[in-house]
Amino acid sequence: MSLRITHFSADVAPTEDRPRPDRLLSGNPRRLAWTHYETADEALSCGVWACETGAWRIRFAEDKHEFFCVLEGEVRLHEEDGATVTVLPGEAAVIPAGFVGVFEVVRAVRKYFVVAQTPQA
């Protein structure tokens, strides 16, 4: 097997989706993901994600973590207890496994993402 560096400037086709209607809180944002790297078992994926403004409920699996860094726009995460975290261009955050809350795109966003799934004990 040949191991090669993955450079994010490579041209990859995006996947497109929208939040599920039962989770949608505002807008109906178009979401695009350019996955540049993914392991065969899908335990790790990395790429660029872009989204229009809107908000929806999220519920992360108990084994799924996401690190992201905002390139442009503004994201606000709402925790179940009412606390909010705003992430601006040049800032980064981690959404931990099992997180339940609201993902809000305040200004159209573009971000790097790294999603890792860890083995359940």
Image (spheres, rainbow, N blue to C red):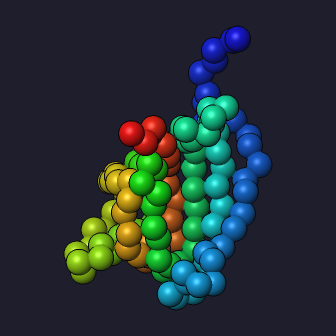
Q: Is residue 14 left or right of residue 26?
A: right
Residue for point 52% across, 59% down: 110
Tell which of 67 and 112 is nearer to you.
Answer: 67
**Callout count:** 0
Compared to residue 62, the image places residue 78 above or below, namely below
Whether residue 18 appears in this view of the structure is yes
Quarter containing the N terminus: top right
Q: Give the x, y percent position of residue 117.
A: 48, 43
Q: Is residue 38 left or right of residue 58?
A: right
Q: Give the x, y percent position of residue 88.
A: 35, 62
Q: Give the x, y percent position of residue 17.
A: 69, 68
Residue for point 74% across, 40% down: 11
Compared to residue 72, the image places residue 9 above or below, namely above
Tell which of 89 and 111 is nearer to you.
Answer: 111
Q: Give the x, y percent position of residue 28.
A: 62, 83
In terms of image quadrants, where is residue 40?
top right
Compared to residue 47, the image places residue 55 above or below, namely below
Tell which of 120 and 26 is nearer to you.
Answer: 120
Residue for point 29% across, 76% down: 80
Tell which of 41 and 5 is nearer to you.
Answer: 41
Quarter containing the C terminus: top left
In this view, the residue farthest toward the top is 1
Whether residue 69 appears in this view of the structure is no
